[in-house]
Amino acid sequence: MNSAPHLLLLQQSLPPISSLQNPKPTLRPSLPAHNSTPGARKSTPTYITACAKTTRKTGGRRKNPDDYHATLTALNSKGRFPRKSLGQHYMLDSEINDQLVAAAEVGEGDVVLEIGPGTGSLTNVLINAGATVLAIEKDPYMATLVSERFAQTGQLKVLQEDFVKCHIHSHMSSLLRSIESSGASSRHAKVVANIPFNISTDVVKQLLPMGDIFSEVVLLLQEETAFRLVESYLRTSEYRPINVFVNFYSDPEFKFKVPRTNFFPQPNVDAAVVKFRLKQPTQYPPVSSTKSFFSMVNSAFNGKRKMLRKSLQHICTPSEIESALENVGRPATSRPEELTTDDFVKLHNLIVKE
């Protein structure tokens, strides 16, 4: 394939270089991990780093930061153009990748899961920080590209799979065991990823219950999604079962906002970074069955405008629900948006008989 026309196409699609020389992400103060107060609101050319004029030290190593030109060259090396169906938006600002890695406190010897490495800009920062990376990439061309780029490091394993369908717990457990058998110290892994916006909820639901494997999950999400996951304010239309799920398995924290101008192609929305500190299984709220617990929560929100004594009457009688709510310290007329995660736990233990 003649690469010149494709290169021209990419150049025409990217924003002007001048606008990306020193992009400054807009920072926001961290929000509280959880507010439970009622009423609160893949020919195989090698990777070329284009125009990387400066290097920086990170963790005693030297690296070339990925930028506008590096992303352009990497995509062109495979004759690729971002695919909307895969939700591909490539990061153009290496400073934000640095901040993602810093938010997860990644250091020498850490094991990190990355979802959708793309051209490897974030992978580059993770490896230079001393981490061993397991990358899951659905696009076979990008999987090949990132594998070739870091083949000499010995710090990257790439699985060409669809993340939402792969057995990530098995893959990570196997990797951690192999590292431990080599004599390295055993520890929980971390997740650091710039994920496609269209699978963010699936990723969150798959990762958060893995506190036995991961200690932190740091994700770059659509800004609106980030706020919904962290600002679990009661008595609002945004309070949903996912908020109960997030707070059951983790302590979430909004880290900072990432303007849409930092991506290629530029999405229609801004992004934000959220850090989830995962709870260990022994720290989960005490319920007899997580399956029955979340089934109850989902039933409650299926009738969001209904009182719980009506939406949960398939579990027990309305009078029993009213009595249980009073024991929880909530009015008999309570609706689902009025209960915290702890309230739902207490209610479940009172009305669900195993």
Image (tube, helix red, strand yellow):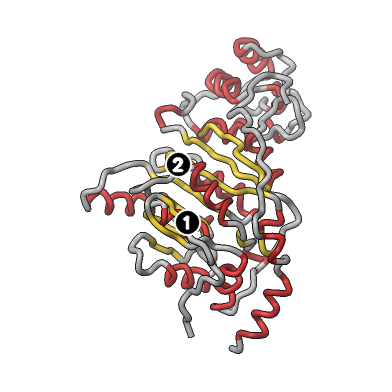
As drawn, is 35 to the left or to the right of 43? right
Asked whether 295 or 92 is in front, the reply is: 92
Vertical comparison of 214 with 199: above or below = above
- CA gap between label 2 and label 1 equals 18 Å
Quadrant position of residue 231? top right
Which mark lies nearer to you, 2 or 1? 1
As drawn, is 302 to the left or to the right of 138? right
Residue topped by disc 1: 56
Residue 45 visible at all: yes
In this rendering, the count of numbered labels is 2
- Mark 2 belongs to which amino acid? Glu
Residue 170 visible at all: no
Asked whether 305 or 320 is in front, the reply is: 305
As helix, strand or loop, the secondary structure at mark 1 comes to strand
- What is the residue that sits farthest to the bottom in this orientation? 2
The residue at 71%/26% (across/down) is: 337
Expressed as whole percent of the image width and height from the top left, the position of residue 92 reads: 62, 60
The residue at 68%/44% (across/down) is: 26
As drawn, the label of residue 105 is: 2
Expressed as whole percent of the image width and height from the top left, the position of residue 350 reads: 55, 18
The residue at 41%/51% (across/down) is: 129
Asked whether 330 or 158 is in front, the reply is: 158
Which tag, 2 or 1, sits closer to the chain's start?
1
Expressed as whole percent of the image width and height from the top left, the position of residue 98 reads: 52, 50
In the picture, the quarter occupied by the N terminus is: bottom right
- Mark 1 belongs to which amino acid? Arg
As drawn, is 269 to the left or to the right of 178? right
Vertical comparison of 142 with 283: above or below = below
As helix, strand or loop, the secondary structure at mark 2 comes to loop
Expressed as whole percent of the image width and height from the top left, the position of residue 275 reads: 54, 39
Vertical comparison of 216 with 323: above or below = below
Quadrant position of residue 76? bottom right
